Image (cartoon, grey):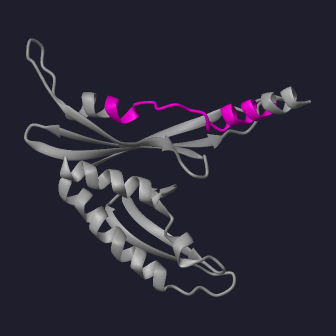
Amino acid sequence: MRNLKIVISLIICISINGCMSSRNITEKHIKTSIEKHAPGDYSSINIYTIFKGVTIDRTGYLELTGYKYDNKKGLVIGADKYYLLRQNFKGDYSKLAEITYINLSLAQCKAIIYNYEIIESKIQASNPIANEEIYHDYTVSDDLFISFKSKFGSSSQTSSRYIYFWINGEKFQVSTYKIMKKLVKFINY
């Protein structure tokens, strides 16, 4: 019975991509879309891993990778969102993975660090009523904003434990402490 539970857990883990290892989607984007390659020429780029992992709700995969290239420093966010497709036959658990890339300047990276603390303080001051959720957002670019959510009955510390990256309208929930600490290290890199 115990072995059956382990096998079922493994199947569930694999089916929702919770056991997925790093996929280097941002590295591919940086090497093929940002770095320029010409036949017969040499090229160099520095890549700095900030975050790679499955989101808290396990419905997506997020990578943040910084780079130094051509006297510029920037950040690429790669986001996969998984959708379970309608079954075509019994036992069909096909999924669609949609990858989105966002390129951010160093100024936009710094804006995330500065403004997350502002919206975090706003969420700390929020006092939602029953059945209400309060979001405080900061817009980083046309296709990215960050936010915190507070809901009735949750403590202010719980509300800021996870930050949401809204990428092209899709929500990716990650640990605030983990991502911000690494983003600060990248900015100082």
Residue 32 shows up from this direction? yes
Q: Quadrant of residue 1?
A: top right
Residue 73, quarter of picture: top left
Residue 157 % position (x, y): 52, 73
Please say whether residue 11 is one of the residues in the magenta stretch.
yes
Residue 90 drawn in magenta: no
- Magenta segment: 8-28
Q: Residue at x 22, y 52 (%)?
A: 187
Q: Residue furthest right?
A: 1
Residue 44 location (% of width, % of height): 14, 26
When the figure is inspected, residue 130 is found, relative to residue 61, above or below; the finding is below
Query: Residue at (12%, 44%) from the top-left corner?
Result: 72
**What percent of the width, then of the height, locates residue 150?**
55, 76
Residue drawn at 27 percent across, 34 percent down: 30
- Look at the image and tell me whether residue 79 can be seen: no
Report how many numbered discs are placed on residues in the image. 0
- Picture layout, residue 182 above or below residue 71: below
Q: Nearer the viewer, residue 9 or 164?
A: 9
Q: Is residue 109 left or right of residue 101?
A: left
Decide if residue 7 is on the left or right side of residue 171: right
Farthest residue toward the front? 2
**82 horizontally vs 118: left or right:** right
Residue drawn at x 45%, y 30% as measured from the top left: 23
Q: Is residue 101 above or below residue 174?
A: above
The location of residue 184, given as percent across then percent down, is 28, 55
